Image (spheres, helix red, strand yellow):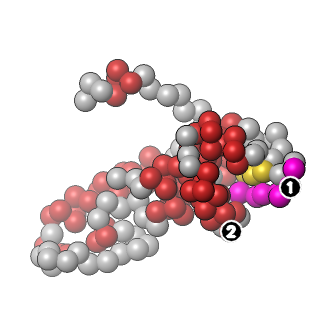
Amino acid sequence: MLSQKTRYAIRAMQHLTDRHGQGPIRLSEIAEVQNIPANFLTTILSELSRLGIVASQRGKDGGYWLAVSPIDITYGDLIRVMRGSLALVPCASRFAHEKCRNCVEEGDCRTRALMLKVRDQTAEILDAIRLSDRIDPVPATLVDED
């Protein structure tokens, strides 16, 4: 499951993508429109700025904007920088691999084998969708039918 921080980062980046090329976007606008606590958003945008994904300018006309074109950022990239991994369990992570506690040997674990498949298919999907790709909201009634 995605952390709240990662979900906020995705929404903030979508907002900056929607306003791409329009100059600095005020933090207060992003926070209000995306319903993200301003203090938490400051931390997220600062982290993305340190990574070179977002740029900022202080002052009266300041704000944030994408430092990288939205066509060059995939959702997989964004989730990895915020979360560290796309894997649901630590033993299935490519870059943050850890053995699971209280488990059988990794080579004998069918759950790990399953989670490796889930990780690979998830990565394939998220690495194919860019911030520049149009994503329309899905009506709540369709989501609630699962």
Question: Across the whole image, how many numbered discs are drawn on residues?
Answer: 2
Task: Sort mark 1 into few (<14), some (14-19) or many (20+) by Cα contacts within 10 Å.
Answer: few
Distance Cα–Cα, label 2 vs label 1: 19 Å
Q: Which residue is mark 1?
A: 59
Q: Nearer the viewer, residue 47 or 89?
A: 47
Q: Amino acid at mark 2?
A: Arg
Magenta part of the chain:
54-60
Of badges 2 and 1, nearer the viewer stands 1
Instruction: Please tell me whether mark 1 sits on a helix, a strand or a loop.
Output: loop
Q: Does any portion of residue 130 appear in the rendered image? A: no
Q: Position of residue 132 (x, y in %)?
A: 65, 40
Q: Amino acid at mark 1?
A: Gly
> In percent of the image, x 68 and y 68: which residue is there?
50
Q: Position of residue 141 (x, y in %)?
A: 35, 20
Q: Which residue is mark 2?
A: 50
Q: Nearer the viewer, residue 33 or 89?
A: 33
Please say whether residue 57 is one of the residues in the magenta stretch: yes
Q: Position of residue 45 (x, y in %)?
A: 65, 58
Q: Quadrant of residue 138?
A: top left
Tell me, for residue 116, which label it has, or none: none
Instruction: Say whether disc 2 or disc 1 marks the residue closer to the N-terminus.
Output: 2
